[in-house]
Image (spheres, rainbow, N blue to C red):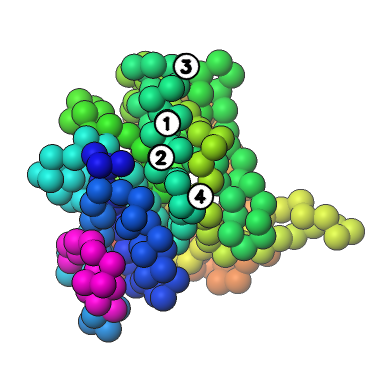
Amino acid sequence: MNDVCAIVVTFHPDDDVMENLANLRPEVAALVVVDNGSSAAELFALRSTAATVGFEVIENGENLGIATALNIGIRRAQALGLAWLLLFDQDSRVAPGFTAAMLQCFESSRWGSRLAILVPSYTDMRHGTPVPADWVPGSGLETAMTSGTLMRLTTFQQHGAFVDGLFIDSVDCEYSLRLRRAGLILDQCPNAVLLHSPGSPTYRGYGGSRRFTIDNYNPIRRYYQERIRIWICRHYLFSFPEYCLKILIVSAKDLLKILLWETGKAQKLRFSLRGVFDGLRGRMGRLDLR
């Protein structure tokens, strides 16, 4: 653990986030928090926690997106001379021994030098239920979630940074596909559990069953989701046609759910279609609402 740097991107952090950071700090040699434009009061709380717990805060002053914030944190880890990276969302919580379990899994992996990313087993902290992973038969995970990702710094150096222009959505999916296209493997550690909060979905169904998950994302988030799905298909269609077909089907289902069940239908549909259009024309970066 002496060579591990944890990187957490914060955006309007609350008290629960401060507790997550306090739990994480003893697990690693260094903790770097990159803040994406939180308020003055939120930054005051973050600085106070940093002084008490002992971690570094890099203040971006504005929302530069997940990809850019992660890249800033990783470059700071490189400057600190640390060999391992642990990436986290602000709403994820570790238990004692998390990092040791992850390192042990990584170093004893059957994949050897082909293993590029290791993620923990995820548990939904609201319901206490496991979050299932998507597997490719005989080839590890299809994609890896950012939060809980363990990787060597050399992987970042050899295969490049996260794509800044993707901004917030599916940054981890793109990086996963990039590594897999290079012949590398993504895997999951069964012995390390991360408590994770995957948004605020609601459920629809019949007879008490949960047949449909309604994500309730806001219109701007819908924009980024649709844009990145198109962008990924443009860049990875020939390498991963089945994955691209799957995410396009997800897009179609999301649009149907908006029409049938979500509030603010018109605005969400407008932003979703704008995301598709911008994805087709290759527009990147933060959405300009002017």
Q: Residue at x 32, y 34 (%)?
A: 151
Q: Amino acid at mark 4?
A: Leu
Q: Amino acid at mark 3?
A: Arg
**Tag 2 secondary structure:** helix
Q: Position of residue 240 (x, y in %)?
A: 46, 23
Give the number of the disc on residue 194. Answer: 4
Question: Is there any visible trace of residue 209 in the rendered image?
Answer: yes
List the residue tagged with mark 3. Answer: 110
Q: Amino acid at mark 2?
A: Ala
Query: What span is colored magenta in the figure?
Result: 45-59
Q: Residue at x 55, y 23 (%)?
A: 136
Where 158 sits versus 96, above or below?
A: above
> Upstream in the sequence, badge 2 or badge 3?
2
Quarter of the image with the N terminus is top left
Residue 40 shown left or right of residue 128 in the figure: left
Crowdedness of circle 2 by 10 Å Cα count: few (<14), some, many (20+)? some
> Upstream in the sequence, badge 4 or badge 3?
3
Q: Is residue 51 magenta?
A: yes
Residue 157 shown left or right of residue 85 in the figure: left
Measured in 3D between alpha carbons, the distance from the residue under mark 4 to the one under mark 1, in whole angstroms, is 16 Å
Closest to the observer: 206 or 156? 156
Measured in 3D between alpha carbons, the distance from the residue under mark 4 to the one under mark 2, in whole angstroms, is 13 Å
Residue 127, quarter of picture:
bottom right
Q: Is residue 245 magenta?
A: no
**Tag 1 secondary structure:** helix
Q: Are marks 2 and 1 in contact (CB under 8 Å)?
A: yes
